[in-house]
Image (tube, rainbow, N blue to C red):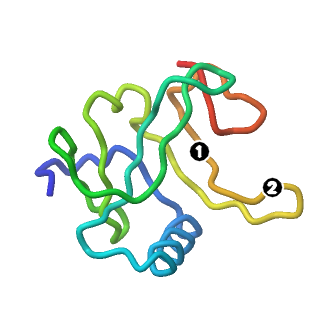
């Protein structure tokens, strides 16, 4: 685990519940953690990476609300302070990303410009 006490992101209770459900549904082993990151693309320049993966060289490992989370140092500039939530409403269902580093967010909510 990382020896820092500053966590890069937060996960809401709803996000933890849904991620735990997905993890159990996929029968993932304990060596899998939640990977959060960014990649080039999307309608606003960057899109989010969210999925389960094994730790790779260059990853930082955190425990956030009881969930192991993988995070690449170079993504910190774009993601530090972000909150991930699970939305289950009539018009929208899925993970939402509340990113204080985003200058612009697209209408779909899964890509941004920083």
User: Which residue is the site of mark 2?
Assistant: 92
The one nearer the camera, 95 or 11, is 95
Which SS class for mark 1?
A: strand
Classify 43 as above or below 99.
above
- Judging depth in this view, the residue of 98 and 39 nearest the camera is 39
Name the spot of residue 53 as percent of width and height, x first.
Answer: 34, 57
Task: Give the percent coordinates (x, y) of residue 2.
Answer: 15, 51
Question: In 3D space, how far apart are the residues under numbered discs 2 and 1 (Cα atoms)?
Answer: 13 Å
Choose between 6 and 97: the one closer to the eye: 97
For the point 50% across and 68% down, the residue is 19
Residue 92 x/y as whole percent:
81, 55
Above or below: residue 22 compared with residue 12: below
Asked where in the image residue 46 lies, by quadrant, the reply is top right
Q: Which residue is mark 1?
A: 97
Residue 33 in the figure: left or right of residue 81: left
34 sits left or right of 92 in the view? left
**Residue at 59% across / 44% down in the picture?**
97
- Where residue 113 sits: x, y (%)? 58, 20
Mark drawn on residue 66? none
Dot 2 or dot 1: first in sequence order is: 2
Secondary element at tag 2: loop
Q: Against 18, is 2 above or below?
A: above
Tell me the crowding category of disc 2: few under 14, some 14 to 19, or many 20 or more residues within 10 angstroms, Cα based: few
């Amino acid at each position: 685990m990382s020896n820092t006490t500053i966590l890069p992101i937060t996960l809401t209770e709803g996000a933890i519940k849904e991620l735990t459900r997905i993890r159990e549904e996929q029968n993932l082993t304990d060596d899998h953690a939640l990977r959060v990151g960014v990649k080039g693309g999307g309608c606003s320049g960057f899109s989010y990476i969210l999925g389960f993966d094994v730790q790779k060289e260059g990853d930082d490992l955190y425990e956030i609300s009881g969930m192991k989370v993988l995070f690449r140092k170079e993504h910190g500039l774009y993601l530090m302070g972000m909150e991930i939530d699970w939305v289950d409403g009539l018009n929208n269902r899925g993970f939402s990303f509340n990113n204080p580093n985003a200058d612009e967010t697209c209408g779909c909510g899964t890509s941004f410009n920083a």
